[in-house]
Amino acid sequence: MTGFVRCLMGAFAFLAGCPSPGWGQLQWQMRDLNFKPALMETNVVARFPFQNAGRRPVKLLAIQSSCGCTRVDKEKKTYASGEKGEIVADFVFGDRVGLQRKRILVQTDDPGESTVVLNFSVEIPEVCKAGAAFALWKIGEKKDPKTINIKTAPEVKKVTMRMKGAGFLAELNPTKNSGEYEVKITPLEVSRPVMAVIELQLEIGNGVARHHSLFALVKSDMVRQLLETPENNGK
């Protein structure tokens, strides 16, 4: 065997134990997940299994999620050659609806891929539809009540309401149509800026409840013009 061949074989043996350029030692089963939860679900758990396919240990230096609503767990920090692990993200819906996209950044000491990007999306079904997101008054306006109409999903068994903040009175009244309600909001004062959150709790059954938030605001005329659109403002 010539020296050139021996050198060539040695180079292949060395490269076999190294990650390919742009690819790290951690091999992931998947990096993108999609969820379509049922109405009864209040969270999803995204799991990203991996294995250290290289010859050297890999240390997880940091894990960051794109928002505080995603809680990320890691089993341990250092993974030996051949060892398996899993990144787990628990996303709690709260009052979010529609398509939600979340990202997790995993930083490691692997020179082949020091940052790994994991993604998951969740299509959260609507538990209710509101005719407006806000009820707005300008400073100095008459303290006339405004109404936001609510229509709940058929699975909703009960609707309750609570006010977060001061400066407004709110009433929740069912209409003659099943699953439809009116939220009547009246400002107590309109001489200065005031804001409150009206939280609707929608009980689905088996101890499961979802939330939907409405907003009541007294603002200056300029701010009101920016916020007030036909689809946002209660009448």
Image (cartoon, grey):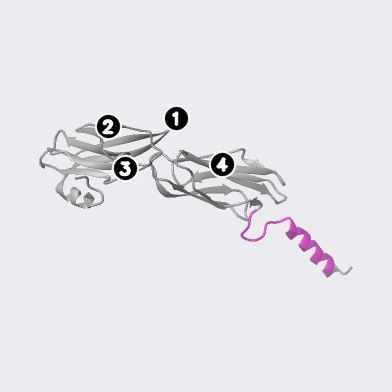
Q: Quadrant of residue 208?
A: top left
Residue 207 circle label:
1
- Residue 172 x, y percent position in the rendering: 26, 34
Q: Of discs 4 and 2, which sits in the foreground?
A: 2
Q: How many numbered discs sit on the rendered protein?
A: 4
Residue stretch in magenta = 5-24
113 within the magenta span: no
**Alpha carbon separation for disc pair 4 and 1:** 25 Å
The nearer-to-camera label among 3 and 4 is: 3
Q: CA distance from mark 3 to mark 4?
A: 35 Å
Mark 2 residue element: strand
What's the amino acid at mark 4? Answer: Val
- Quadrant showing the C terminus: top left
Magenta span includes 12: yes
Residue designated by label 2: 163
Mark 4, secondary structure of its residue = strand
| Residue 204 placement, left or right of 108 | left
